[in-house]
Image: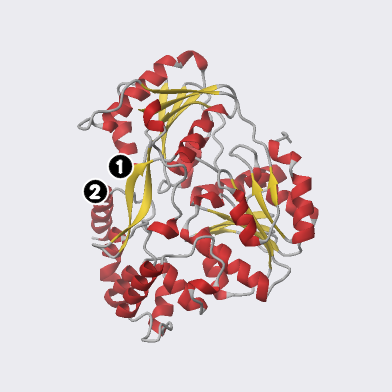
Amino acid sequence: MTRLPIDDALPDLIAALRARGRAVLQAPPGAGKTTRVPLAMLEAGLTQGRLVMLEPRRLAARAAAQRMSETLGEEVGQTVGYRIRGEAKVSKATRIEVVTEGILTRMIQSGPDLPGVGAVIFDEFHERSLNADLGLALCLEIAGVLREDLILLAMSATLDAQPVADLMGAPVVTSEGRAFPVDLRWLDRPLGPGARWQEALHDLVLRAEAETRDMGGGLLVFLPGEGEIRRAEAALKSRLPAECRIQPLFGAMDFAAQRAALTPLAQGRKVVLATAIAETSLTLPDIRVVVDAGRARRARFDPGSGMSRLVTERVTRAEATQRAGRAGRVAEGVCYRLWTRGEDGALAAFPPAEIEAADLAALALELALWGAAPGDLAFLTQPNAGSYAEAQALLRMLGALDARGLITDHGRALAALPLHPRLGHMLALGGPRAADLAALLGDRDILTGAPVDMGLRLEALRDTARFRR
């Protein structure tokens, strides 16, 4: 088995978990924490229960389970399995279960003492999603009140580990990464106010491919969403050399297509057009060049719709550093950035936690179901009081909470649906006729294979309607 940087930190990590039952692991991307740590915990016999590891994305959950199973020489679903929305590969023999973050919330709400679970691992906690923050807060209460034996581990690539460690009352274990030098190349001058950044990015990809052709290895191009990926694919297909093969990579793709983007080519040069899904957790072993559009999608509260929506913003320095690091995993690499060196200093240091900017209606519903107020739980960042009050007002209007703020039967039904409470309410009242509209308006797509671009969503729904006829 190939030795990875995380291996040197595993003895200290296992010792900390054995002594304290909690730890924070800080390890940069490429250290191997996602696949090595759960197996090391299992081998050490820290618990007789299952190890549940949270991943922020479905592809990362599947890929982590696949890599760990390959390490053990097994099929997925034996010792290591995964569970995501609408799909599961687990068995009675499964000891490590990789899940997406919302799955843990449902597990906790249906069994507050997490029966059969011996440890919960929060991977990529630096992304600070609402579900991850909520999951950690709930697990800390469970460990303090119901399950003193519950092992908790938060793993992070870029987050300042000390605040998380203070919240958990846990030691910090640090692992060095394995990275080769990456040559950063910025634009000579900023894009003008009227410049079309997507066209500028297409030109930058062509330049990067030409300048690095002798290096070998593939190119990884970071774009904010599927719509931009599809447009880039159409624009570049006829302009790249014939030996280049374009591989899109985004969350709504089917797993086989995602796996193809992660697999090295036997011949030719791969050009992966990816969303932020490729920043962490995934292994892309043949990438030598990164082209960064400098943009990312984030959930922001939209007062017009009363829900979160995804908006395109500039990346932060932490995100840009992670993206550039993808070029230095296997050898020296190059990262082309669609901004100038001067603009780099104006970028924010870290992305905001989702709890600070997104709609809190779903969080308020989960807390009402749990029977707690935000101040009752140990959140790393407490939700804004005004935003939380607005969320509760919405839930009362929907009939999910009563006048005292207690959850109603209707609220319990809404909490069981993988939808925003507004959309769940619409679906509960409208039935099958409202399903397509709920899918169209959802801030996270519930159509299998349907993309997040609104135009493409409409097309997917038209195709579905034609199929039904």
Coordinates of residue 33 in the picture (x, y in percent): 65, 44
How far, Cα to Cα, is label 2 from label 1?
9 Å
Give the number of callouts: 2
Q: Which residue is painted at 68% across and 41% down in the image? A: 175
Coordinates of residue 316 in the picture (x, y in percent): 43, 41
Q: Secondary structure at mark 2?
A: helix
- Is residue 202 toward the left or the right of residue 317 in the image? left
Could you classify mark 1 by the number of other residues whose Cα lies within 10 Å: few (under 14), some (14-19), or many (20 or more)? some
Coordinates of residue 192 in the picture (x, y in percent): 24, 28
- Which quadrant of the rendered structure holds the N terminus? top right
- Is residue 193 toward the left or the right of residue 288 in the image? left
Mark 2 sits on what residue?
455
Q: Which residue is painted at 34% across and 20% down in the image? A: 188
Q: Secondary structure at mark 1?
A: helix
Q: Is residue 251 visible?
A: yes
The numbered mark, 2 or 1, whose residue comes first in the sequence reads: 1
Specify the quadrant of the image occupied by residue 147. Answer: bottom right
> Residue 100 or 337: which is nearer the viewer?
337
- Is residue 96 toward the left or the right of residue 444 in the image? right
Could you classify mark 2 by the number of other residues whose Cα lies within 10 Å: few (under 14), some (14-19), or many (20 or more)? few
- Which quadrant of the rendered structure holds the C terminus? bottom left
Residue type highlighted by circle 1: Gly
Residue with the most extreme left position: 194
> Residue 430 or 267: which is nearer the viewer?
430
- The label shown at residue 227 is 1
- Is residue 43 toward the left or the right of residue 189 in the image? right
Coordinates of residue 214 in the picture (x, y in percent): 49, 13
Up/down of 179 relative to 360, above or below: above
Up/down of 22 relative to 320, above or below: below
**In contact (CB < 8 Å): disc 2 and disc 1:** yes
Residue type highlighted by circle 2: Gly
Q: Is residue 225 visible?
A: no
